[in-house]
Image: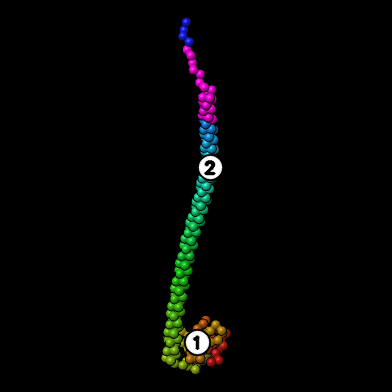
Amino acid sequence: MLPTVQTTAKPQSEVKSEEIQKKKEVEKQQATQKKLKKEQAKVKKEQEKLKKEQAELAEKQAEQQKAQAEEQKKEQEQLTKEKAVAEQKAKDLKIQQKQQATLAEEKRAALIAEKEKEAEEAQKEKEKMQQQQEREKKEAESKQASPPANSGDSSNSGGNQYVDSSGQGTIKGSVNGIYHLPGGAYYNRTKKVVAWFKTPAEAEAAGYRASER
């Protein structure tokens, strides 16, 4: 027969105290776990909030970048347009300046040609006047050197003859139908001579009348 082991039972108060202690520890652990879960939930909430803020910030930055890109594109397009306009204006100005230079050169050439023509005409007029003066001088000298015609021949000659050294008549028949004798008041002034006569009779026979002076 085995010996009987006798166990000494704990007092009831001690058992109760241990149960109370265990219960407190369990409650404490539960409280700690509850607090931990609460903190984890808070952290998770903060993380979600931070994630949301980061997403919003990223979206905002993307919108800003897009807006900046569009603005830069518009500015570039505007610059390109202004550059094209400036280049066209410069081209038009260059063409206008060239046209103005050509026009000025044409005016200058026309003015030079006109002045040369005027100078040429003036030279011709001067030479003509000199020739007329020389001719009038010769006529005056011829008149002084030529003796009066014989009055006995007046029936054939029609009066005194006015000729130069070469026998050319010196009586001027003007465009107005008037003849002028050498030495007359208007003889030297008469430039538009259409006919020359040796005697007044020849002039009158041609339809001219004598000058009053």
Q: Is residue 95 above or below residue 107?
A: above
Q: Residues within 10 Å of mark 2 (few under 14, many from 20)?
A: few
Q: Amino acid at mark 2?
A: Glu
Describe residue 62's horizontal placement relative to residue 127 as left or right: right
- Horizontal and vertical percent for residue 52? 54, 40
- For this rendering, which residue is in front, 36 or 98? 36
Which numbered marker is on residue 53? 2
**Residue 138, quarter of the rendered image:** bottom left
Question: Which residue in the structure is indicated by mark 1?
Answer: 189
Callout 2: SS: helix
Q: Residue at x 47, y 12 (%)?
A: 5
- Horizontal and vertical percent for residue 183? 48, 91
Q: How is the image coloured?
A: rainbow
- For this rendering, which residue is in front, 61 or 26? 26
Magenta: main secondary structure: helix
- Horizontal and vertical percent for residue 91? 48, 58
Residue 23 covered by magenta stretch: yes
Residue 70 covered by magenta stretch: no
Residues in magenta, as a range: 5-27
Residue located farthest toward the top when viewing the structure as drawn: 1
